[in-house]
Image (tube, rainbow, N blue to C red):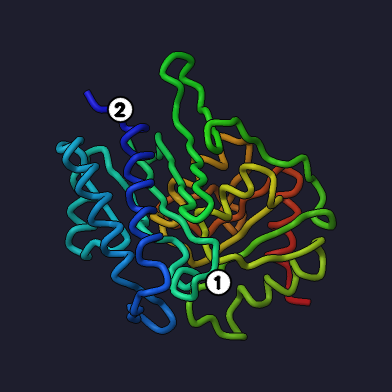
Amino acid sequence: MHNPVEAAAEAARRGGAILREHMGRVAPREKGPADLVTDADLASQDAIQQLLTSRFPNYAFLGEESSEQERSDALASGKPLWVVDPLDGTANFVHSLPSFSVSIALIESGQPVVGVVYDPLLDTLYLAAQDPTSRRLRVSKNGKAISVSDCAELKRAMVCCSFRPGVKREDPEVGQFLNILERSQSVRRLGSAALNLCYVAEGCLDAYWANSVKTWDVAAGYLIAKAAGAQFAATDGSDFDLWNPKLVVASSEALKQSMLECLNAPPV
C-alpha cells in the first residue's frame, strides 16, 4: 500500500525538477489580464497527476491547470482529493526570479490531511501530516521541526501580502496595503502564496494576508502553517474557509486581531 505523504513529497520533487529544467526558456501565455501560464505549469501538473493517480486510482485530482469540467467532477466525486498547484508563482518563474513552488495537498472530508510545498531552487521541502501513532499534526522543513515566531505586535511584524493580477489602485487591497504599511515593521509581496504560508510557519514572516488566492494556492500551506501554530481567519474576521480563501494568518492570536483591525479600518 502506498503512503500518501511519501507520494506527495515525491510528486512535488518531480514537478519541481521539471520547473528547474524549463526555467529560463519558457514562453508565457495569458489566462487573463496579467495572469500567466507556461508549458512548465502544464508539464509539472502532468507529471504530478500521473504519479498520484497511478498510485491512488480511487482518489480524485484537482489541479490549477485542470479544465473547469475536471475540477467540477473532482469536487463532486466525494473521494479523497489531491489539490495541486504545479507552479505557484508563475510570474516570478517567467522572470527567473526565485520564490516559486509546487504545492500538493490531500483533502479528506473537506479538510487537508497532508500538505507539501516544495521550493525547487532551494531544494526545500515543507511537509505537514498527521502522525500515524500520536494522531497529532507534525510539520517540518527538510525533515526538521518548525514553528511560528513569537511576534504579537503589528509594529514589530514582518508582513506579506498577495494582490490579484491586474489590481487597480481603487481596489480594497490597496487601501489595506497602505494601512498595514504604515503600522507594521515592514511589508513584502513575494509572489508565491504557498511559500508565504510556509515562511509564516517557520517564523521568517509574522503575518500574511490575501483576498484573491485560490484553494490550490493555499491548501497545503494552510496545513503547514496551522501545524506550526499559526492563527487563521477570513479577512472580514469570520472563520477561515479553505474553499473561499480570503485569509489572514499570523503567528499569534494577538497579531491576528491587530491585522484584522488594521485591514478593516478606513484607508489612511
Q: Which mark is residue 139?
A: none
* Relative height, residue 35 to residue 220 (above, below): below
Residue type, mark 2 in image: Asn
Q: Dot 1: what SS?
A: loop
Circle 2 packing at 10 Å, graded few (<14), some (14-19), many (20+), is few
Q: Residue visible at 19% across and 43% down?
A: 53
Residue 204 pos. (x, y %)? 69, 49
Q: Kindly identify which residue carries mark 2.
A: 3
* Relative height, residue 92 to residue 99 (above, below): below
Q: Kindly identify which residue carries mark 1.
A: 163
Residue type, mark 1 in image: Phe
Q: Residue visible at 54% across and 64% down?
A: 98
Q: Is residue 261 left or right of residue 98?
A: right
The CA distance from mark 2 to mark 1 is: 36 Å
Residue nearest the observer in this picture, 70 or 38: 38
Task: Look at the numbered discs 2 and 1 and tell me whether their residues touch, using CB distance below 8 Å.
Answer: no
